[in-house]
Amino acid sequence: MKGRSGRAGRTVRKRKRKREQSVRSVSLSHQPQYIRLMRFLHRRGFSSTLLQPVLFSDTGRGLQTLQTIMPGELVVSLPESCLLTTSTVLSSYLGEYIKSWKPLLSPLSALCVFLVCERQRGEASDWFPYINVLPSSYACPAYFSDEVVDVLPAGVRRRGLEQREAVREMHSSNQEFFRTLQPVLSRPTEDVLTYEALRWAWCSVNTRSVFMSRPSSCFLSGPDTYALAPFLDLLNHRPDVQVKAGFNEQTKCYEIRSVCGTLRYEQAFINYGSHDNQRLLLEYGFVAMNNPHSVVYVEPDLLCDILRGEKSLDQKMKFLRENHFLENLTVSSEGPSWRLMVALRLLSLPQTLYHLWRSALLGQVVDEKTEVRSSQTARTLCQQLLKDTHIALDKISQLLGQCGGPVREQLEVVRELRQEERRILESCVTALKDSVTLEKETSSCKANVGADELTPYRSSVHTAAVSYFFLPTKLLKRH
């Protein structure tokens, strides 16, 4: 009896732990702002009985299914009248000011100015029900404090600073246009169209808009592909989910159709694209755990640091740059990408073999010594990246003990990114260690047996590694 009681107790404890570890959810449908949002959308022709807004313990806000969604079934269909586009802006009270302004505004600038102006109008705005449920701030690098920017990976740091500069440029270059809007604003333009306000609007469009190609307007400059989609933009991303998304010209609705389906009362996910976590952080302000697309990027400056003192390094780097082989150099948990190994193979060539540069660029194995050296360089590279990651994680831990609020939230998402990079790099270092050992053993074997008695040699890392690229298109392009 005692034994049975012990087993029963363990079973109960396991079930309890499983319940505690499961995702918890709280419906938001009863909250006034979401009731108001749904009424706003229903007046514009939207009807949905499949989904409800919910706060999930793991992902935050999202949409939960109220009934099972079958494979191929529509997840959501949002009428064009519910979409906030440049057509919305040009037909509003801002339209006459934008149409008469030279030089022409970009579609992004027009949308940002409209969001800021509507936000300051409060409940008097037609779009208030939507603006009222938008985040008040974002976890994108454009929002990061300097201390958080400093612990980002080098590439993300550079592009995060570019985000900041893009917002500052929008703010500074449009000051004269902003002043023309004074007649439609209840406060001075400099108090409404501030850098902080435009940053919020820029991130709202950049993180939440769907891709919707539209005819170019004679009143705006550049491609017009942005559309804000109320309610639909509550759908969260999951890397392994497949959906079909786009604007249906027949129904005049933006539609998302499930490929595999979703069970009742589960969170409905979509896929923003095959993006690694660095891109997810830059464009959307979050990272996805266990992301199969995640890689660690290698900056050209790091290559130069690792190979400093090498003869003809400058000429080789110039050759790689001219042939576009210094972009998208990555490592995954399985090893270096093909592009990275091509670059390292060329950089590892002796100065006397400059006539083989083109062959190396085509991915051809030059000689065994170069192969071994390029693998050893790859390992040194990953070890340096791993060292930098550990330093950054230590710094993040220190900062987390000193701050709170938005800065703490920013640090948490950067820590998740850095922790995943640490896992990738540790696996990569192990894979490279095994590869270098194999190459040395193979070289030794060749020396003893004779090259003519061995099959053509190629490193396992080089044949197994995958080349990773940023994908320029998305099923659902939430800029």
Image (cartoon, grey):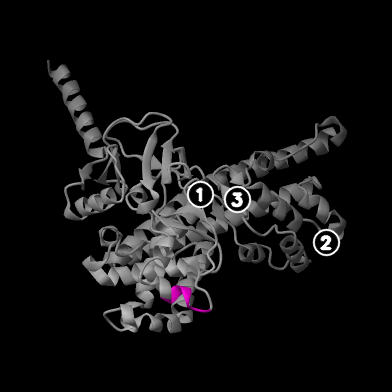
Range of the magenta residues? 97-102
Residue denoted by label 3: 469
Name the residue: 58% across, 54% down: 382
- Helix, strand or loop at label 1? It is loop
Label 3, label 2: how many angstroms apart (C-alpha)?
30 Å
Sequence-first tag of 3 and 2 = 2
Mark 1 residue type: His
Residue denoted by label 1: 275
Q: Nearer the viewer, residue 308 or 130?
A: 130
Residue denoted by label 2: 351
Verify whether residue 157 appears in magenta. no
Horizontally, residue 244 falls left or right of residue 467, namely left
CB within 8 Å, label 3 to label 2? no
- Helix, strand or loop at label 3? It is loop
Residue 57 image position (x, y, % from top left): 26, 46
Q: Nearer the viewer, residue 222 or 205?
A: 222
Residue 112 image position (x, y, % from top left): 40, 68
Name the residue: 29% across, 40% down: 48
Horizontally, residue 84 falls left or right of residue 430, namely left
Verify whether residue 100 appears in magenta. yes
Sequence-first tag of 2 and 1 = 1
Label 2, label 1: how many angstroms apart (C-alpha)?
38 Å
